[in-house]
Amino acid sequence: MCGTLYTTDTAAAVNNFFPIVVSGLGFGTNKTYGLTAPPFLLCVLCMLANGFHSDKKQEGFLHIALPLTVTVLANIIAVATLNVGARLWTAYTYYDEPRYVAAFAVNFGAAVIAIGMATTTFLYLRRQNAKLDRGGSLGKSGPTAIQQASGFRYIL
């Protein structure tokens, strides 16, 4: 799970330099912040909705993997086209050079690795739940006997 978190943070590294790139397009400080704020506000709303829905459904894997899939697609679009409309969908308003291919490749790779790690965690926890269903013990690091008796299961 730590690896998933680390690679997810790496995949989102564009957040660290997005305002700098927008200001490089010749906008002043206030206009730059005005242009970069909407994607961040939309992100907050999406994260809250995703988190609440994940809690409601008691499911985590798809709520991690699907947003990362959108990240992968956004990175592909940002590198593959110079069309401003398509790039606005990815929240990257870079018009021409530099294309930031290396940066987007790292973000893309990190998102793919994060999806792989989330999938591995999902499969491992599903296997642990199956072991609990059969009445098996998960050892010292697993749930206690009291937790097992009360129906403890890992949320997938």
Image (cartoon, grey):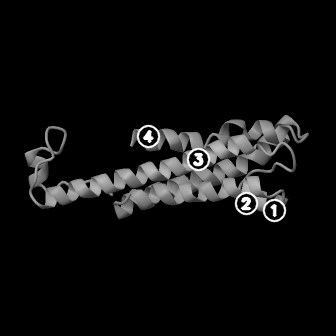
Query: Which mark is nearer the camera, 3 or 1?
Result: 3
x and y, in percent, of residue 151 in the image: 15, 57
Query: Marks 4 and 2, how far apart in space?
Result: 28 Å
- Asked if the residues shown at circle 1 and circle 2 are in contact, with their CB atoms under 8 angstroms apart, the answer is yes
Query: Marks 4 and 1, how far apart in space?
Result: 34 Å
Decide which of 110, 14 is in the foreground and name it.
Answer: 110
Left or right, residue 117 beside residue 124: right
Which residue is found at the position 52% from the left and 44% from the top? Answer: 8
Query: Which mark is nearer the camera, 4 or 1?
Result: 4
User: Where is 60 relative to 23, above or below?
Assistant: below
Which residue is found at the position 86% from the left and 37% from the top? Answer: 24
Q: Say which mark, if any, is on residue 109.
A: 3
Decide which of 33, 94 is in the foreground and name it.
Answer: 94
Q: Say which mark, if any, is on residue 85.
A: 1
Residue identifier under label 4: 3
| Disc 4 residue type (three-letter) | Gly
- Asked if the residues shown at circle 4 and circle 1 are in contact, with their CB atoms under 8 angstroms apart, the answer is no
* Mark closer to the chain start, 4 or 1: 4
x and y, in percent, of residue 14 in the image: 67, 42
Residue identifier under label 2: 89
x and y, in percent, of residue 28 in the image: 88, 37
Query: Which mark is nearer the camera, 2 or 3?
Result: 3
